[in-house]
Image (cartoon, grey):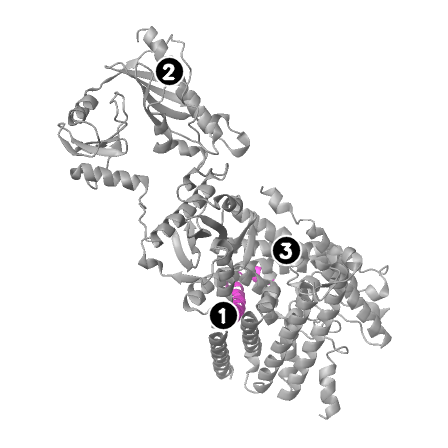
Amino acid sequence: MDKNSKLSVVTKGFLKENPVFVLVLGTCPTIAVTTGLVGAVSMGLAATAVLICSNLVISLLRNIIPDKVRIPCFIVIIAGFVTLVQMLMHAYLPDLYELLGIYLALITVNCIILGRAEMFASKNRPLDSVLDGLGMGLGFTIALICMALIREVFGKGQIWGVDIPFLKDHTIGFLTKSPGGFLVFGLLIALSTVIAAKQGKPAPKLGCAQCPQAGICRSAGVTDDDCAKTEGGND
Amino acid sequence: MKELLIILMSSVLVDNYVLSKTLGICPFLGVSKKIDQAVGMGIAVIFVMIMATAATWPVQVYLLDPNGLGYLQTIVFILVIAALVQFIEIVLKKFIPGLHKALGVYLPLITTNCAVLGVTIDNFGNHSVGGEIITGLNFGQSLVYAAGSGLGFLLAMVLFSGVRSRIDGPTTPKVFRGLPVTLIAASVVSLAFLGFGGIIDNLFK
Amino acid sequence: MKRSFSWSSIIVLSVICLVMSGLLAVVNGITAPVIKKAEDAKANGALAEVLPGGTGFEELDISEYTLPSSITGVYRADGGHVFKTSVTGYSSGLQIMIGVNGAGEVTGTKVLSSSETLGAENTYGATTVGQTVATIDGLDTVAGATKTSTAFRQAVKDSLNASIILGGGTVDLRTPEEILKDSIAEVLPAAAGKDFEKVFLVEDLGEIKNVYKVGTDGYVVEFDGAYAGISNDGTVGVNNTTLSSDKLSAVPAILEASVLTDVDISGLEISDKITSVQKTASGNYVFMLKASGFGINGDAEYGISGLPIIVKTSVSADGVILDCLTVEQHESDGIGSVCENADYYSKYAGRTEGTLDDIQIAGATYTANGYRTAVSKVFEAVRKLKEAGK
């Protein structure tokens, strides 16, 4: 790969293949921890760290791990790195550790990470996998920041915990609660649909294709059609 | 008894895993289009949540904590849940094929459902019961909490599948069709659940 | 092919698990002390909260001291001590941190963990600030949360006592029951370790307020907080009281000689609280009473038993209550049920008509009022019985 394509491995995650807005993966933390920028950035960076480490290790072991047990192996590796990040944050960033609470441990089951392990790291060389992890992690962080910016500014009248004049006295309180999370996420996905339509690409839909469990889903009789498939393209 | 009832009611209505804690969103959005699938998934989640709690609570209390291995919680829990789901599937297939036919297909989906891992970890977290904060539920309370969380999941799935069947029609603006309108509908259902906020404290006063 | 595949799968998965666990163990070795230190610093903040101005907190080894059993930890600071206590209120596991300064006053309390139902412990703490070991018993319990506030007060009292012990003083940590048991064993050595029961007095023994019968070995009498032992034949053992031996040696004979005969109360206009009357040869009366406490008069919303409190009381011919005993009660557990404790009903002994008003139970007004009303009916009954020549 030349230098350009290496760069594109990193940057594709930012917008073109943004894991949240285009691939629609990792919806749970996207709604749960984006009530403020502090939580969003720390969650994004924690997940990025896990993603880079797990991608690296899985890529290094890609020829050793038998196909049959690859998902359990990936999960153990990811859970290990999540615990590592948890311990380090508990020790050195206790406030953020308290803030993220259970969602930190739940990075383990964030489908972005398992998805990248399955889709990319297990098929590519270590350096590329690290770059992919970095790009996807930062893309995830960017998405969380977008969500948190809207919710914190209009929901709390603050930005990074600092009061904004006027808005502070005119907050839309429900944006900081879970319904607000669903709403803002829905609106941002709609925006992403508009952009995709302009570029002549299919609209984002729930990340079944990227999900390592897609095969199981289909065998369960849940088709892509069930997975919130947009009808926009058919009109 | 009252304490258990409070735990059950608040995990179903107030701290609903999907609508309030926003965990388990993927199956909530993905498998809620048809009501029979929603019910199947919901029942399977209740089942796995209770079994996973029954398995992980003793592991944490009798195996990890006494040996100072509390830090292995995440890694051990996810493995226990994965193994448990496999085991349940094999047992169901062999002994209760009828149930396996109904639920079996949903079981593997649940392995990496964050609501299941969330419940098993939350059992050791802080819970507000009648104005008191309890850190770490006992075994019985944990099972009730798991059952309540699963019921809450089922309730959310069933309600939402009812809502969804009406929203995605030709009158929906084009850019909102599909996922965006689904999320906005989820927001409205979640808003309804926000109304349960103070109910438990007043119900059991 | 499938089999060999499985073996390598299992080995690889196991190796990955082991390596990850090992890695975590190493990192845990590095971070655990840091986390512990941060949590200790946080805990020290809590220590300073209950002992404002205290500095240089240092944990003491409590196994080196004989402290009340509720004390689970002690921190010594420049300004006083902080005690960690664990007591049982409405449910077990009420953990309270209590600061006591050098002058033996409570400086602050903090509930560390609690499964109490009403949350009374969170407000009760403020009322204990400034209390000393001399004043703590006078602190009222919280109505409706008697168990919680009593447990809280016990924790504070234990902490105050512990602070005296740590300051080099001595405190009698025995409960009233233990003191009684030890005293009985002292004055009647044959009775040591044996069961004893309080004798329901139907005869006027003058200054003697309590008599305990120890199996077949004899009696122990209590007067003014001191005890004397008497064998069945009237031989006086150890006598710590100021009573004369003659008076003491007569006690067994008086007690054994008293015979009760039933009195027919039909036709007499006495209170319906009185269910039956007996009379001694010496002219004293024994009444069985039916008191309407919370079980009868209480608010049905809170669940009432519908059953009365059964009280037995003896009254001398000149209208002095000789003894009183709660035979049966169905009052609210932990609140009205206090009426079955000896330190409640024994307050009636020695009282005369019109002097009962101060006998109360904090938080159990229905129980105390019903009990007192029933007992107060005996004085009129005694007059009418005497008029009727019965």
Q: Give residue A119's position: percent from left, percent from top.
A: 66, 80
Can residue C317 be found in the magenta stretch?
A: no
Q: Are marks 2 and 1 on the same chain?
A: no
Q: Nearer the viewer, residue C91 or C142?
A: C142
Q: Is residue C360 visible?
A: yes
Res. A140 image quadrant? bottom right
Query: Which residue, given by chain and number where applicable, does mark 1 sit on?
Result: B71
Q: Quadrant of the C terminus of chain A?
A: bottom right
Q: Quadrant of the N terminus of chain A?
A: bottom right
Label 2 – label 1 distance at C-alpha = 72 Å
Give the extent of the magenta segment.
B74-101
> Mark 1: which amino acid?
Tyr
Res. A224 image quadrant? bottom right
Q: What is the chain identity of the residue bearing mark 3? A: B
In terms of sequence position, does the residue under pointer 3 or pointer 1 come before the other? 3
Q: Residue at x 58, y 67 (%)?
A: A97
Query: Which residue, given by chain and number where applicable, does mark 3 sit on?
Result: B16
SS class, disc 2 = helix
SS class, disc 3 = loop
Dot in front, 2 or 3: 2
Q: Residue at x 44, y 44 (%)?
A: C153
Number of the label disc, if any, that sits on residue A9: none
Q: What is the chain identity of the residue bearing mark 1? A: B
In the picture, measured across the screen, residue C221 lies left or right of residue B30, that is left
Label 2 – label 3 distance at C-alpha = 64 Å
> Mark 2: which amino acid?
Phe
In the picture, measured across the screen, residue C259 lies left or right of residue C295, that is left
Q: Give residue C177's position: percent from left, percent from top.
A: 30, 39
Q: Give residue C263's position: percent from left, percent from top.
A: 30, 13
Q: Give residue A144's position: percent from left, percent from top.
A: 71, 70
Q: Residues within 10 Å of mark 2 (few under 14, many from 20)?
A: many
Query: Which residue, given by chain and number where applicable, does mark 2 sit on?
Result: C379
